[in-house]
């Protein structure tokens, strides 16, 4: 329709404005207010006088309002382009410096050990209660006899409930929060959830999500794209809240380290940072689920937009997608694709 392009631009500008307000301006404003109270309480000179800090916050005056507004906008503008870097930092991409690599390797080994322990716990429980055979009798193996001796004070139902709980929780944690391959383990919990998505999304179709997803989002229906973007916005908000809270914690330590028990105030923003980070892990899983659903529902729209033949079988689809992944990801000039003839050619 006429003017549709302008409407799209205006709608996009409004979306960017909402994103900036929620994701960038809100956490930045909270950080500025926190530092403002620290400064007005004169904690950098002597023991903090919180009455002065709260009075300045409640009645900041025109100059205070202007300062708070400009500082909040300034911090938001400066940190807004760093959003991707913040997410990658919390995922565990810390560069190749010797110190960061040593820390990264240590964390990876820790999570690999945790994964192996979860697999061992599952296997131990499976020894006594085979997966999917909940109605079977106890095993006559030596391990089963030992379990009955050790649990003689418990009923069989209690022992089975315990083993079933260990098995189910071990499987849930392993399959939800970690990549399938041990070599894909990342140094942070958020990184492991995101890596699982990056590796698994579209793998059943031989599609590589990080490569095709930008193309896919341009052809997916608006409501599908909005759902994915909403999940991503929530993830970005929690990551930024965690990052800004860590800065607030550092500021509290800088201002209050000489004032005894007042230093405990730094625990407040640290607690907010921890809760926000844990929330980011949950939201990352939801974002991954939304993105996987979009791949499942809209991959044929991607094929059509690229002018490719509609695959008739999953085998044919995987064969085509292996070449498509190389063509889009590596821009290989040696990949040959068959395009679907247009109706005008008939």
Image (cartoon, helix red, strand yellow):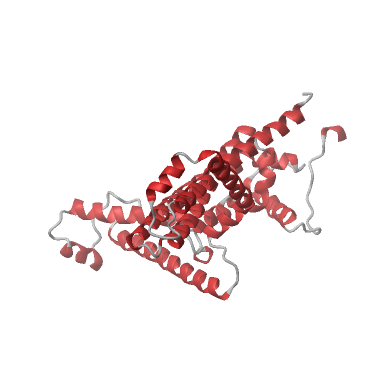
Q: For the C terminus, give its image quadrant.
A: top right
Q: Can residue 288 be seen in this view?
A: no
Q: Where is residue 67 in the image (x, y as percent from the top left)?
A: 57, 45
- Can the viewer see residue 210? yes
User: Residue drawn 70% across and 42% down?
Assistant: 302
Residue 30 placement (x, y as % from top left) = 49, 46
Q: Position of residue 217 (x, y in %)?
A: 66, 42
The N terminus appears in which quarter of the rendering? top right
Q: Residue furthest bottom?
A: 98
> Where in the figure is residue 83, as x and y percent of width and height?
60, 52
Of residues 327 and 277, which is closer to you in this image? Answer: 277
Q: In this view, does 263 lie to the left or right of 86?
A: left
Q: Nearer the viewer, residue 168 or 42?
A: 42
Relative side of 316 to 140, left or right: right
> Compared with residue 151, is residue 54 higher up or lower down, i.e. above or below?
above
Q: Which residue lies furthest to the right in this view?
A: 345
> Which sits in the foreground, 112 or 88?
88
Taking depth in this image into account, of 69 and 341 the one nearest to the observer is 69
């Amino acid at each position: 329709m006429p003017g549709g392009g302008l409407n799209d631009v205006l709608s996009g500008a409004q979306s960017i404005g909402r994103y900036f307000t929620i994701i960038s301006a809100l956490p930045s404003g909270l950080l500025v207010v926190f530092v403002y109270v620290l400064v007005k309480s004169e904690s950098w000179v002597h023991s903090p006088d919180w009455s002065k800090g709260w009075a300045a916050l409640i009645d900041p005056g025109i100059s205070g309002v202007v300062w708070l507004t400009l500082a909040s906008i300034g911090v938001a503008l400066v940190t807004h382009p760093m959003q991707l870097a913040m997410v990658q930092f919390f995922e565990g991409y810390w560069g190749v410096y010797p110190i960061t690599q040593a820390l990264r390797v240590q964390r990876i080994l820790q999570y690999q050990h945790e994964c192996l322990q979860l697999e061992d716990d599952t296997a131990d429980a499976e020894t006594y209660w085979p997966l999917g055979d909940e109605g079977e009798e106890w095993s006559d193996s030596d391990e089963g006899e030992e379990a009955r001796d050790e649990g003689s004070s418990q009923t069989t139902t209690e022992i089975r409930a315990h083993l079933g709980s260990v098995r189910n929780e071990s499987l849930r944690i392993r399959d939800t929060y970690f990549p399938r391959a041990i070599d894909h383990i990342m140094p942070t919990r958020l990184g492991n959830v995101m890596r699982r998505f990056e590796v698994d999304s579209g793998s059943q179709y031989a599609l590589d999500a990080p490569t095709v997803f930008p193309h896919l989002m341009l052809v997916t229906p608006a409501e599908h794209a909005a759902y994915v973007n909403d999940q991503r916005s929530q993830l970005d908000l929690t990551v930024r809240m965690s990052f800004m809270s860590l800065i607030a914690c550092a500021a509290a330590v800088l201002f209050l380290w000489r004032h005894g028990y007042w230093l405990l105030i730094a625990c407040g923003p640290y607690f907010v940072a921890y809760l926000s980070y844990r929330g980011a892990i949950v939201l990352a899983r939801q974002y991954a689920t939304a993105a996987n659903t979009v791949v499942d529902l809209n991959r044929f729209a991607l094929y059509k937009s690229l002018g490719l033949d509609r695959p008739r079988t999953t085998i044919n689809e995987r064969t085509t997608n292996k070449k498509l992944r190389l063509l889009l990801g590596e821009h290989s000039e040696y990949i040959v694709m068959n395009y679907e003839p247009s109706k005008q050619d008939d």
